[in-house]
Image (spheres, grey):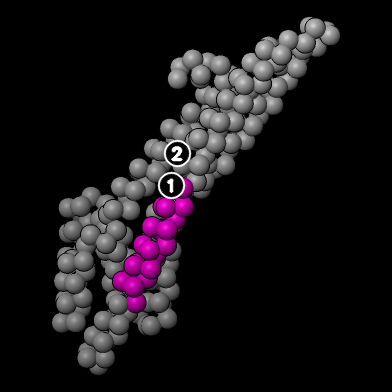
Amino acid sequence: MLELLEKAGILVWPILFCSLAGLTIFFERLLTFRSVGRSDEAIGKVFALLQEGSVAKAGEYLRARKKHKRHGFPEERILLEAIAVADTDLETMEMVLMHAVDREMKRLARYLSTLATMGSVAPLLGLLGTVMGMIRAFSVVEEMGGRVNASVLAGGIWEAMLTTAFGLSVAIPLIILHNYLEGKLDAIQASLEEVAVSFLKVWLSASTKGN
């Protein structure tokens, strides 16, 4: 493998960097996504407190959990932001919830564009390496004049094609991993929106009882 890397030329190293950076982003985002949906019990308790009219207690409970869990869970941050404006009108509450969900989605989608870029750049680097290798191979042929050595030409072309092979080998998995994370992100968005809608229903129900 090391011999192949050496023969592939200097552009194989940026391709390997794309691979390492892409895999790092994938696993980091995957771990981040695992934090979503792990606070169902806490959300249920918050909704129960809201139905009882204990808005202040619900806020204290979420703030305590956020402090204990360091950064907290996305669903809980959304609810905490909504509870902070619990005494406002419906339009304001909907706007706050929409903004909170949008903010969390942007936070979760961080680095995904970089992962997609790595998947797109890798095959282009491979193609560039192949073109440069072909230029070198035909330059050798020109230097040899009319005495074209088929083995020399074939060897140069073989080495030039290595970068394309490496670029595609890196790009294909990265594109698959990116699409997988995009699918997970869509599911997470649906989940967060469901939490926001559920909160709105509970909040409206509690407000009606209060009146």
Badge 2 is on which residue? 22
Is residue 60 within the magenta segment? no
Q: Is residue 143 visible?
A: no
Residue 64 lies in what quarter of the image?
Answer: bottom left
In this rendering, is residue 50 above or below 102? below
Q: Position of residue 48 (x, y in %)?
A: 16, 77
Nearest to the observer: residue 74 or residue 120? 120
Q: Position of residue 156 (x, y in %)?
A: 66, 16
Q: Is residue 147 left or right of residue 159?
A: right
- CB contact under 8 Å: marks 2 and 1: yes
Is residue 181 within the magenta segment? yes
- Tag 1 or tag 2, which sits nearer the N-term? 2
Q: Is residue 133 left or right of residue 46?
A: right
Q: Of circles 2 and 1, which is in front? A: 1
Element carrying mark 1: helix
Residue 59 lies in what quarter of the image?
Answer: bottom left
Q: Position of residue 39 (x, y in %)?
A: 21, 62
* Magenta span of residues: 176-197
Residue furthest bottom as drawn: 211
Residue 76 lies in what quarter of the image?
Answer: bottom left
Q: Main secondary structure of the magenta part?
A: helix
**Residue type, mark 2 in image:** Gly
Q: Is residue 202 visible?
A: yes
The crowd level at tag 1 (other Cα within 10 Å; few <14, some 14-19, many 20+) is: many
Badge 1 is on which residue? 177
Element carrying mark 2: helix
Nearest to the observer: residue 34 or residue 157? 157
In this rendering, is residue 194 above or below 151? below
Q: Which residue is rendered at x = 42% and y = 58% of the image? A: 183
Q: Which residue is rendered at x = 71% and y = 14% of the image? A: 150
